[in-house]
Amino acid sequence: MGPPRVARRPYRLGAFAAAAVCLLAVVASAAAGGGEEAGHRRALQVRQTLGPARHRHAYAAMMYMGTPRDYEFYVAVRVMMRSLARVGADADRVLIASADVPREWVRAMREEDGMRVVIVENLRNPYENNLGGINRRFKLTLNKLYAWTLVDYERVVMIDSDNIFLQNTDELFQCGQFCAVFINPCYFHTGLFVLQPSMDVFKGMLHDLEIGRDNSDGADQGFLVGCYPDLLDKPMFHPPENGTKLNGTYRLPLGYQMDASYYFLPLGLSWHKQRWDDLGYAAEMPVLMMEVLMYIVIIAFTRLARPGMTKLCYNRRPEKQNALVQWLIKLTAMVALVAAYTIPFFVIPRTVHPIMGWSIYMFGALALSVLVINAFLLPPLAVLTPWIGIGGALFVMAFPWYHGTMTMLERDPFFPRLGEPSQETEFSKLY
């Protein structure tokens, strides 16, 4: 009797231990699942919605705290939302605000600007370690995903606070489940995009955040590019004339998301737009008049002194010149040609009105180009080709070919994809 009891005891202990291990595994799994569900519930929880939905559609922006320019973004949101009211947008204006946005700001945006405010908890950014330096201000841009929770609306246009609306764009609400603009050939931009709210889509995005879906920039744009990787192959959006809504995903024309650099030169080298009655403009008028007079004198001098300049600066008989002299003359001509197009740019005051600034630049470049033509006996058309190109580009930007904010021809009618029937060439209305 003794031996069997001794032999059975380890078996019973082993069975008990195995059962305990299984029970602990089940409890741990349930706890992990419960933790994930709790995390999802916290993300899904909207703290408070201030104001009822009054329309079927909405323009939405987000605001969170923790950047060096919180107040500037607050002002920008209000300016943008008021620009929507100015153009007569027939939609609600919604602000997705993090819980730490000052209550006074929220009150002002609700009562003075007529926004509907949705207060939310910040979404944890699992990619924040990939954000370096100044880009850390984008850590909370994933709050933009809350736009998919606005299920009171059929369509939502999500916009960044640094936009401003020049005319009504309500036709965007006819777009499909997701639509965005490609401002570069590789990635679409999330400064403005159209979406169809859906809690299922939002939960799927939260799951993607949990598992760490690839994100090229650690912010909202890289995440959404990963969610819609084939958007570049989708058709261009054209609003149906009967007002019906489209299904699917579409590319938006570039005119819906124009950057300021399309109007003015970047990198701080442009002439800032000022009011015509600005005091600085009046103070710069003598300088501008002196520049214009100088260019007129240059043109007159080069025309009158052309014979003497030709004998002095250039000799068409190569037998009277050695190779070094010819090389120096060619080098001088090239340097003079580059200077003709760069000097007028840098001598114009940076605060002058763009119309006046570009006009004086074109006149100055023409004057110096005439000097180069007469001094080196160069063919006029070759020297003035850059001048014609710059003038043409400015003309196209100043006088659009359609009723929109910028001039652009749609790519697809001119460059159809292989295997697709070519469409009739036509101009498209872009906003």
Image (cartoon, grey):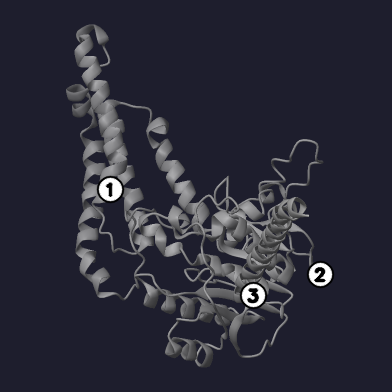
Residue 129: x and y in percent read 44, 55
| Residue occupying image coordinates x 52% and y 79% | 97
Instruction: Check residue 344 in the rendering and tell me which mark sits there, or answer none.
Output: 1
Left or right placement of residue 32 versus residue 165 in this view = right
User: Which of the two residues, 410 or 392, is positioned nearer the viewer here?
Assistant: 410
Q: Earlier in the sequence, mark 1 or mark 2?
A: 2
**Closer to viewer: mark 3 or mark 1:** 3
Task: Tell me the quarter of the picture where residue 314 sits.
Answer: top left
- Mark 1 or mark 3, which is nearer the start of the sequence? 3
> Foreground residue, 367 or 342?
342
Farthest residue, direction top: 319
User: How far separated are the C-alphas under marks 3 and 2?
Assistant: 35 Å
* Residue 124 marker: none
Q: Which residue is mark 3?
A: 41
Note whether 191 is above or below 14 in the view shown.
below
Q: Quadrant of the N terminus?
A: bottom right
Q: Amino acid at mark 3?
A: Arg
Above/below status of 126 relative to 185: below
Spatial distance from mark 3 to mark 1, Cα to Cα? 62 Å
In the image, taking residue 74 as reference, residue 365 lies left or right, namely left
Q: Nearer the viewer, residue 185 or 259?
A: 185
* Spot occupied by residue 49 in the image (x, y as percentages of width and height): 60, 87
Residue at (46% x, 74% y) in the render:
64
Q: Quadrant of the C terminus?
A: bottom right
Question: For numbered disc 2, what is the local secondary structure?
Answer: loop
**Residue corresponding to mark 2:** 244
The secondary element bearing badge 1 is classed as: helix
As drawn, is 141 to the left or to the right of 5? Answer: left
The quadrant where residue 58 appears: bottom right
Q: CA distance from mark 1 to mark 2?
A: 52 Å
Residue 30 appears in the figure = yes
